[in-house]
Amino acid sequence: MGKGAYAASIPAGVSVDKRTQVNKAAAFDDKPVYLMNNDDRPIPSNHWDSSLFFQNYGLGLWSSPLRVDTSQQGFQVYYPTEWKSDGSDLKTDNPLKIGGKDFNPGGTKAKDWSDWMVSFRLGESPDKYIDATLGEGMPYVWLEYHGVQPTLQLEAAGNAKFFDLQGVALTLPATGDALGLEYGGRSYGIFAPDGTKFETDGTGLTVTFSGTSQFLVICPLPAAKDIGTFHQYAFAVPRETRLTWQYDPDKGTISTNWKIKTESLKGTETQIIQGWLPHHYRNNISKLDFNGIDYITGRGTMHCAVGNEFTLTYPFTGILPNLPAPNLPAPKPSDGDEHDFDPARLQTQLAGIAAKLSFGGDTYWGGKDLVRNGQAALIAHETKDPSHDAIFNAERAELVNWFTYTPGKTDHLFAYYPKKKGLVGFNSSFGSEEFTDNHFHYGYFTVASALVAMQDPQFATDYGPMATLVAKQYANWDHDDKRFPFLRTFDVWQGHSWAGGIGSPNGTNNQESSSEATQSWAGLIFLGQALGNKDMLAAGVMGYTFESQAAMDYWFNSHGDTFPPQWPHPIAGMIWSSSKVWGTWFTGDPAWIFGIQWIPSSPTLSYFVHDPAWAKQNWDNLMKAFADNQAKDAAKKPGYVPKAADIQSFDGDLASYLLGYVLMYDPAWVDQKLDELGSNPGFAQNPWMANIYYMAHSMTTLGHVDWTCHGNTATSMVYVNDVTKKHSYVVWNPLATAQTVKFFQGSTSLGQMVANPETITIATSLLPAP
């Protein structure tokens, strides 16, 4: 651990509820978990299936395209095929109710799990139980019976009809290994061992197995004609799923490999139908053969493919923690612009930060302050500002305080949960003692640690191991590291993180700020680069690539095909397992609904401006939504004067986030607004504004990201100025030695540059590459 340290168990004085005097962290670590075998294996949290581990009956198991609930009556399998009238969620009605004759289960227990699948037992006794298997994107429910005769309840309103493998109407009883069912306006395939007898009395379906092999596979059919395709692959039940990845800096790609190990319940077929969401297939440059089976999901259209192993590959052109100083080697054309960069103004802003240094006392607000002050220290370092030492020394000291522990300490510490296998910082906030929002909180710590490590290699040596452990709390990238579950907060198939540690009472999970989630991956890239940890860095590239694309698809609908026509809003402020919300946890103000997705401001959010025209339209959508909301408030509140839909209506942190978004595609406008509103205390005195001022003026010269180019290091970006047509090649090198970085346009070599140690280096021309 170097010089870092953490509490090996939860100290008595942390996370104490003021009313009950209960240690909330210790109570959570002691909270019962529902497992078949409690063998000290790390327990997943923050997942789509968390209810299986933390509730007596698993609920809200959105494996997509299905949702499964369990109860004392058995399984309720929902197959949604349309949206609710407001477009916020999928309709879940007319479920298949699957139980057993004289079967009264007492709850569920997780049996096994891997990267995007889970198996669990719904049991009454050691001799009477059903083992179920679900996989994300797998259009099946596998049910393996032990001492239980299956029953399906069919209500009259469902108007049940039956058909065979050829789609021909069938009258029960019937014997075989397949039964087609039309029920509740949907079609299903029900598959079983050879010789299985299906009977009905008009109100239900009874299944009688003919031998010792006893299972049912329930498949939602896009159409009755698809039953033959599902019959071919239904009997391969997944036993393990595993995601691995490989970052190739020279090619500028991240390649992900998806393996599914199956067992044949019947026959010899081992391949499986696996579904893929828009963020999977949108920018994938590897071959992926779809089979024509599609489903509606809460995240858009799911296309299916058949196999046991899939490779998905995506471009990755690099990210930066910040930009070069505005006094660049390639100055913008002299245009007499009154909004030119003023070094004295930036110096005044940095001096103000140095004079009022402060850090929040919990891991969220404290983490935000670590990044805010860390960015200020980086800017002071790049501009050789006299405030640097004061800001940097305070930043370093704060991190050292967090990363050390001695008995008796009750705040600014991390403690390990020996039962739940987690490392949590105290003081906690927003439920982080129960693993909620951990990637938000600790992503700030990993970014800040990387910024400090760049300026102090000894910090990297002394506290890098502790920073790495904090990163692993939310993003353990090593399947073999059993101190933490694999990628705790990240849903590898959904492509984004989940914030809820144990999910909600109805089993669903949520995430609000997509940008803070993306930052958590950027933290791995920056810290991995600073520590020379290639595995951490590659994991960061993988997560950043998926999370940023998921944000564009599922929060912002940037391609226009993931939100249904019924959804009346331009974006989603929060997503749940299958639904979305126009709002936040703390306000319905449209400015914050957008703004919470743009924090904190840095080049890591450049994915929002991949298409500058869309980025501008997105801003216009915000202004219109804000104006409409102000008009509604004025109509409801006599005498209320609506605020103008303009940046002048905002100040404080929110204004910095909004400006931080716009500067990525229209920095000149931000330069102008900063000068016009510079005397407004909400602008002039906000500590984030130094970073906005610095980045906006840097971007004015840089231009915009050239997405066709990349460097062979993850912490590099290429820009092109629209006026001068000049390219700028930018590298953040946190190491103590100079690094040679090669640049490419696609596979064509452009040349190379030398990135100076412990700084951001910019070049406007390249040397020939050997």
Image: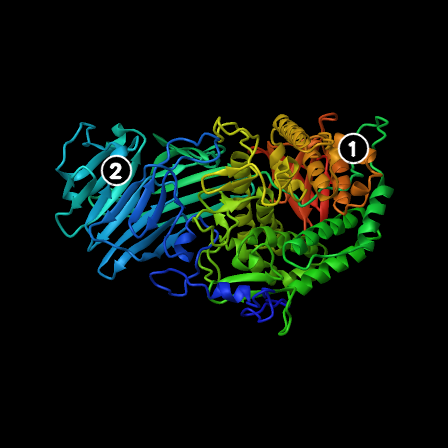
- Element at badge 1? helix
Residues 597 and 112: in front is: 597
8 versus 549 height, above or below: below
248 versus 52 height, above or below: above
Q: Residues within 10 Å of mark 2 (few under 14, many from 20)?
A: some
Say left or right for 233 vs 670.
left
Instruction: Name, please, the residue furthest toward the bottom.
Output: 407
Give coordinates of residue 24: x percent, y percent: 54, 64
Circle number at residue 435: none
Residue drawn where x is 39% and y is 49% of the image: 59
Is residue 608 in view?
A: yes
Residue drawn where x is 69% and y is 45% of the image: 755
Residues 610 and 328: in front is: 610
Q: Amino acid at mark 2?
A: Glu
Residue named by callout 1: 673
**Screen quadrant of the C terminus:** top right
Q: Amino acid at mark 1?
A: Lys
Say left or right for 19 vs 61.
right
Instruction: Compare marks 2 and 1 and give the one earlier in the sequence.
Output: 2
Q: CA distance from mark 2 to mark 1?
A: 63 Å
Q: Residues within 10 Å of mark 1 (few under 14, many from 20)?
A: some
- Element at badge 2? loop
Residues 194 and 82: in front is: 82
Say left or right for 385 vs 742.
right
Residue named by callout 2: 155
